[in-house]
Amino acid sequence: MTSRLPGSTSEQQPFFSSSGVQLLQELPQVRLSYDATNGWLYADWYGAQTAATMRAGSEMLIAAVASGKYTKLLNDNTHLTVMAVTSPEWDALHVLPQLISAGLQYLAWVYSPDQQSRQYTDYAVNRSPYPFVLTFEEYNMAAEWLRQF
C-alpha cells in the first residue's frame, strides 16, 4: 500500500511506502519524517513561516541529526507559502553550521515558490563551506541526487 505524506499532492511529491516512512515529529509549520527506504530525514515545511516557527523547526532538525542516527536530509520547502523573516533574524538562526556540527553530511534543499525564501536559501547555501549542500527546483531531482550517498 502506498500513501502520501500529509499535505502533499501528486504534483508536488511522489508516493512513499507507508511502511517506509515514519513521522518523527510535527510542529504547526513543519513535519519531520524518516524515510527508511531512502535512508534520510525528510523535512516538509509548509504554510507561512516566521522567525519563531523557523527557530522551532530548525531546533527540531538539529536535535534529530544530533541523535546520531541521521546523516542525510531532504529539506523540502515546496509547500512553504510565505517567509515572514527579516535578514537579521535569518542570520541569527545559523542552522546550516549547526546541522553540519551535529553530524549532517548531505543536504538536498528544495526551493520554495516564495521569492524571499529562495533568496534566504541561496544566501545560506552560497556562504556554506560544505560541499554536499545543494539546492533544487523540485523534489524528484533532490531525491535523485541524495540517493547517490
Image (cartoon, rainbow, N blue to C red):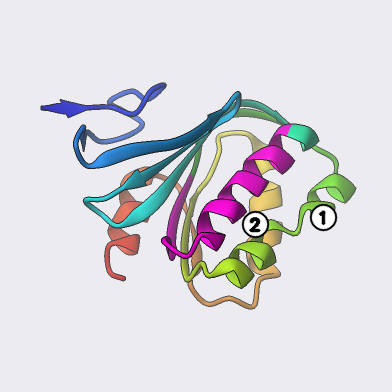
In the rendered structure, are the residues bearing label 1 and label 2 in contact, judged by CB atoms less than 8 Å apart? Answer: no
Q: Is residue 19 left or right of residue 26?
A: left
On the image, which quarter does residue 30 sit in?
top right
Please name the amino acid that badge 1 sits on: Asp
Q: Amino acid at mark 2?
A: Asp
Crowdedness near tag 1: few (<14), some (14–19) or many (≥20) residues, C-alpha within 10 Å: few
User: In terms of secondary structure, what is the magenta stretch mainly?
Assistant: helix
Residue 28 seen in render: yes
Q: Residue at x 45, y 47 (%)?
A: 137
Q: Nearer the viewer, mark 1 or mark 2?
A: 1
Q: Position of residue 147 (x, y in %)?
A: 27, 62
Question: Where does residue 140 sit, x and y in percent of width and height?
Answer: 31, 47
Cα distance between the residues tagged 1 and 2:
13 Å
Q: Is residue 141 magenta?
A: no
SS class of the residue under badge 2? helix
Say which residue appears at 78% left-offset and 34% top-offset: 52
Dividing the picture into quadrants, the one containing residue 39 is bottom left
Question: Would you name the residue on which mark 1 appears?
Answer: 91
Mark 2 highlights which residue? 122
- Residue interval drawn in magenta: 53-75
Q: Which quadrant holds the C terminus?
A: bottom left
Question: Residue at the front extreme?
Answer: 67
* Left or right: where 102 falls relative to 52: left
The quadrant of the picture occupied by the N terminus is top left
13 relative position to 83: left or right: left
